[in-house]
Image: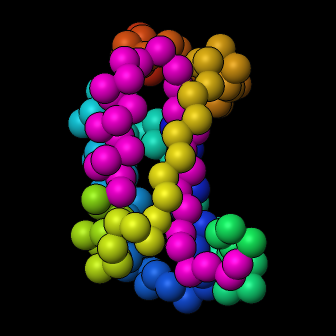
Amino acid sequence: MPFYQCTTRAGLLTGEQKARLAREITRIHCATTGAPESFVTMSYNEVSPADLFVAGEPSSASRITGLIRAGRPESVTLQLLTGISRAWSAVTGRPENDVAVFLQEIEAQHVMEGGRVLPRPGGEQEWLAHRN
């Protein structure tokens, strides 16, 4: 946790762009929240141009959805949203109005990784110290 997923039109991003965007989102998330890099996961979902719609019409817009732990100030959420949107544009060369970024907060006690329930924000170091 966190888990970021980027949905794009098939072929829109190169492998290098995907890697760069994943690194940037990891950097942004960790710098903004203090979470360790090992917590950040990202995947890509490429779909046919006929499978993306906005207002009922085909669209080339991309979507980045992030599931993050709840319990941080709203200012942190805004920094994440802004940073991810800007990173998208910088990495892809596409305008920010070509991507929507969604963050959904999940209580830490509702997530298990490696057989252990995740810590609340701020409890990462203790959690990592007791990892098997």
Please tell me which residue lies in front, 112 or 50.
Answer: 50
12 displayed left or right of 25: right
**Residue at position x 37%, y 18% in the image:** 73
Answer whether residue 23 is visible to the viewer in this image.
no
Which quarter of the figure is the N terminus placed in?
Answer: top right
Determine the image quadrant of residue 21. bottom left
Please tell me which residue lies in front, 15 or 72.
Answer: 72
**Residue at position x 53%, y 25% in the image:** 69
**Residue at position x 55%, y 88% in the image:** 11
62 displayed left or right of 29: right
Q: Taking 1 as reference, is 106 above or below it?
A: above
Residue 32: where, in percent of width, then height? 28, 33
Q: Does the magenta portion include 118?
A: no
Q: Taking 90 as reference, is 120 above or below it?
A: above
Question: How was this image coloured?
Answer: rainbow
**Residue at position x 25%, y 70% in the image:** 90
Q: Which residues are magenta?
A: 57-85
Q: Does the magenta portion include 70?
A: yes
Residue 34: where, in percent of width, then height? 30, 27
Please tell me which residue lies in front, 71 or 122.
Answer: 71
